[in-house]
Image: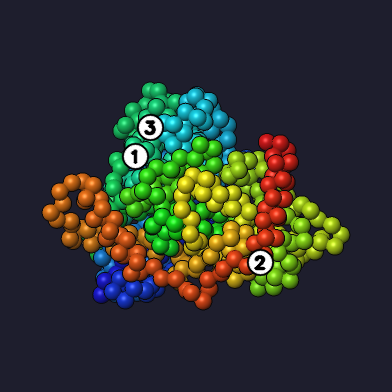
Amino acid sequence: MAYTLGIDVGTQSTKVLIYDTALKKIVVKEQESYDLVSRPDGSREQEASWWTTAITQCCARLDPHLLKHVSAVGVSGQQHGFVPLDHGQVLHRVKLWCDTSTVTQCEELTEAFGGNSRLLDEAGNLILPGYTLPKILWFKQFEPSLYQKMTSFALPHNYINFWLTSQLNMEFGDASGTGFLNIRTRSWNFELLKLIDSTRDWQSFVPPLVQAHEPSGFVTEKAAKNLGLTPGIPVSSGGGDNMMAAIGTGSVRPGVVTISLGTSGTLFTTADHPVIDPNGQMAGFCSSTGGWLPLYCTMNCTVASELTRKLLGTDLTELNRQAASVPAGSDGVLLLPFFNGERTPYLPHGKGSFLGLTPDTMTPAHLLRASLEGAVYGLKTGLQAFVELGLPVNEIRLTGGGSASPLWRQIVADILALPVVYPSEQEAACLGAALQAEWCRELQASPPSHVSAPSHEGQEYEARLLSLVDQHVLTDATKTAFPSQNQHVYSQAYENYLGYLRALTPVFQ
């Protein structure tokens, strides 16, 4: 028996699975949901204890015999969340990736640093509301007494690693989403942190960085007893949910692009060099595999279809049936799905807007189909940015809750004019975490030998990961969607989307 444990701490729930590396299949998986605290100022927060409770409850429902034979653990987590710590104790609710209450702090930091151009030149990313850096400034301004107690911080997946191992560190992938990691040099940018507080010792504040293939630590006696695991097994470096989903969908080679149709919509691919978008629309993240992961993110994806579906009182089956009854392009009805504001394009005060309605098209079916299409138009903008930056784009790997819909898969293929491949296992981030854990375990058991240079050592690490992905990430050929004649209809519809976006941008700002 050769098992690894994959954990994914998401926005709506935490998922835990046991993966059999010998049989190449998931043996069992559990899920536990929790709340999201929302406020009118754009705040979106959770308690870190909700995540640890969810993991504990999931493991309590798993077979103790299986847990005892787990040989490594990997953790995926929602990106950018800010967990302020006082010697390991959480000081405040966690401000999440979808928190837009820090717009003012983003503007303050950007101006103080010298503007967007300097940020792209010296850090590689802009300072956006979802990122961690403006959350730290918010914490100083709105919780000054707690800020003074803060000794360090964690991102969601790092906090779970710390809970499991008592070791606090970060890997480059998730760390690059803080907004203060220089993605070119893979080092902390302390000048950005000093803009928040020139008196604090930031070098002792930031956690040490570890390589993607290295363990973040080893399961403690306390955590092992709590979860039913064997103490001393390695916990891999882990990563953000998008970084782990890249592993879990097989997007670890150039040309393969993963799109996640989840609460947010994300589009990412792998690269062997830093990729900086001069327009600042695309995030130039590092990967959790030792490379880079250029990523485009919209804050509203299944949010749009879920809100529309609930408004109309339809279930998912009825949504797909009604949406399929309307022709491609929804007879001119179009949705700008900015219900939570928007990250890309940068419209934190944006609003959801149905456009192009007539007496004949003011129907539930048209609204439902437009909600599916509107989420994908935003992702097409990201795909075009990839192409303009010279990244190869050959196929789409589709994951996330929305990918279960055959209609939505076809819409994606038609709007993006690319084949859409469906991974057999849709818990991509959780599977990616389990596979990264196996990668870490194998390297701990059998490190590279006779390596003459660090670059060759890195190539050996990467080769082992690629081999694991090739063996374990499977696709379902029966669910592949190819572009149809509707791609021509969507080409014009996309131009209409851009026109509406240009017209309404001044209203949203």
Mark 2 packing: few (<14 Cα in 10 Å), some, or many (20+)? few
The answer to which quarter of the image holds residue 88 is top left
* Circle number at residue 189: 3
- Residue 318 vs residue 257, the one in the foreground: 257
Earlier in the chain: of badge 3 and badge 2, it is 3
Q: Is residue 243 something that shows in the picture?
A: no
Look at label 1 and name its amino acid.
Arg
Q: Which residue is mark 1?
A: 186
Is mark 3 in CB contact (under 8 Å) with mark 1? no
Q: Crowdedness of circle 3 by 10 Å Cα count: few (<14), some, many (20+)?
A: some
Mark 1 residue element: loop
Asked if residue 417 lies left or right of residue 64, the reply is right
- Three-letter residue code for mark 3: Asn
Expressed as whole percent of the image width and height from the top left, the position of residue 441 reads 24, 61
Compared across the picture, whether 378 is left or right of 216 comes to: right
The residue tagged 2 is 485
Q: Are marks 2 and 1 in contact (CB under 8 Å)?
A: no
| Above or below: residue 261 compared with residue 212 | below
Quadrant of image for the C terminus: top right
Closest to the observer: 350 or 98? 350
The span from disc 3 to disc 1 (Cα, nearest Å) is 9 Å
Tell me the residue at 33%/28% (across/down): 201
Q: Position of residue 461 (x, y in %)?
A: 25, 55
On residue 96, which mark appears? Answer: none
Nearer mark to the viewer, of 3 and 2: 2
- Outermost residue on the right side: it is 359
Image x and y of residue 122, in percent: 41, 31
Vertical placement of 284 versus 240: above or below? above
Quadrant containing the N terminus in the rendered view = bottom left
| Residue at 30% in and 42% down | 209
SS of the residue at dot 2?
loop
